[in-house]
Image (spheres, rainbow, N blue to C red):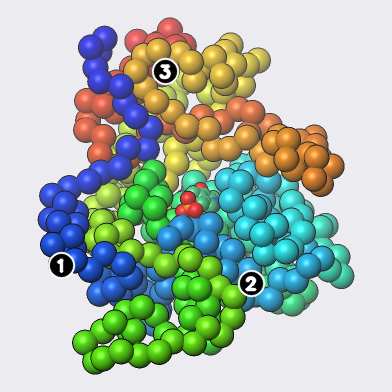
Amino acid sequence: MSQRKYLTFGSPQIMQEEKDLVMECLNSSWLGTGPRVAEFEKSFAHFKGVETALAVNSCTAALHISLIVANINPGDEVITSPLTFCATVNSIIHAGGIPVLADIDPVTFNIDPNQVINKITSKTKALIPVHFAGRPCEMDPLMEIAKKYDLKVIEDCAHAVEAEYKGKKIGTFGDFGCFSFYSTKNVVCGEGGMILSKKNEDHSRLKVLSLHGMSKDAWNRFGSDGFKHYQVTECGFKYNMMDIQAAIGIPQLQRLEKNWLRRGEIWDRYMNELQELPIKLPSKNDENTKHGLHLFTVRVNEKRSGISRDGFLDALHSKGIGCGVHYLSIPEHPYYQQKFKWHPDMWPNARDVGREVVSLPISPKLVDEDVDDVITAVRSIFNFK
Ligand SMILES: *Cc1c(COP(=O)(O)O)cnc(C)c1O
């Protein structure tokens, strides 16, 4: 194990199919938004059982324009989880809204519907549930709350491409479902995102907003049926996906189930072979749901585990294993403390989880020997053979 190569956390699995498709794209000289993006959108929509999907260049972009189409105006409040990536909260701020955090359930790490109810005011306009680690949020109570208080729902599905709740695909509950194809996610384009929207008119507006606010996209403009003028109908953004990105994503989508099964094997090995250690493993999955298995997070509590979380991270690093922290709770960061007067103690469940979590490697690229090494390394920290 001493001369093993460093195991980089979240290292993407890139196969020959991706390389071939990217080369084909480069050789075609069509690099921008074109036929591969259209194919990627179609495959994604098909996988989700919906009519259309819009590819963009990140999940952050997806969240931003979804909030705009959800009609978030200055002063409107948007409720989300304190245990998420900063992009969830930043997108609310960029759209002009005021982020409001509702604490998580310490068992599921997902937003607690009862805490959401406590945060609702006359200014609340939308809710962003984050399906943490790929575990579906409790969509029944959340959608009930949204209906009762007339809130738009924008699902942050960055971890949850494969996830399902009671047989229904994640991202199809809310008005919008936003996905990420960043390099560490379950489907990888390098950078990339996708938006599902319930209403066709929302899809059309998202499409316009994602490309400068232009009424016809560049593909139509420069297609074989001659020059077409475009009109700018609103002040949009540069959020479109490139064909090169889609060329990486298309084969990834075809391997979705295979990769999910592989991560399931790794997940089960961690559950079995780390169970007697003084760390907390992920809690049992809810029945009637499919977990996206994006992150395998353990909790290291200094009192119970005899080592601090950061000590654990350092120890694994020195053994050649790269890990992640998902996430320090949002109010730990100075920007939000200064801007909103937030303090981590205001959301104690997210604070405690954020200070104790470590994500172990679970990329489908890991071979059995890599998984052996992770298990041996973690066990040795606690003096287990
Ligand atoms: C990765 C991530 C995002 C942002 O995705 P990008 O595609 O990198 O913009 C948003 N929310 C969560 C929960 C994420 O993990």
Task: Measuring from the top left, give residue 88's x and y in whole percent.
Answer: 61, 53
Contact between labelled residues 3 and 2, with CB atoms less than 8 Å apart:
no
Q: Badge 2 local density, few (<14 within 10 Å), some, or many (20+)?
A: some
Q: Amino acid at mark 2?
A: Ile
The mark closer to the camera, 2 or 1, is 1
Q: How many marks?
A: 3
Q: In percent of the image, x 14 and y 56: which residue is there?
A: 23
Question: Label 3 to label 1, Cα distance in Å?
Answer: 43 Å
Q: Amino acid at mark 3?
A: His
In this picture, is 41 found above or below 346? below
Foreground: 333 or 320? Answer: 333
Relative to the observer, which residue lies in front, 319 or 353? 319
Relative vertical location of residue 380 with respect to residue 222 in this rendering, above or below = above
In the rendered image, is residue 226 in sight?
Answer: yes
Quadrant of the frame with the N terminus: top left
- Is residue 256 found left or right of 347 in the rendered image? left
For marks 2 and 1 on the same chain, the one whose residue lies earlier in the sequence: 1
Q: Report whether residue 21 is seen.
A: no
Instruction: Please tell me whether mark 3 sits on a helix, a strand or a loop.
Output: helix
For residue 317, the mark is 3
Quarter of the image containing the C terminus?
Answer: top left
The residue that label 1 is drawn on is 28
**Nearer-N-terminus badge (2/3):** 2
- Residue nearer the viewer, 212 or 81: 212
Which label's residue is closer to the chain start, 3 or 1? 1
* Residue carrying label 2: 68
Q: Position of residue 157 (x, y in %)?
A: 50, 58
Q: Is residue 295 above or below residue 292?
A: above
Q: Residue 5: percent from the left, percent from the top?
A: 25, 20
Is residue 113 toward the left or the right of residue 366 in the image? right
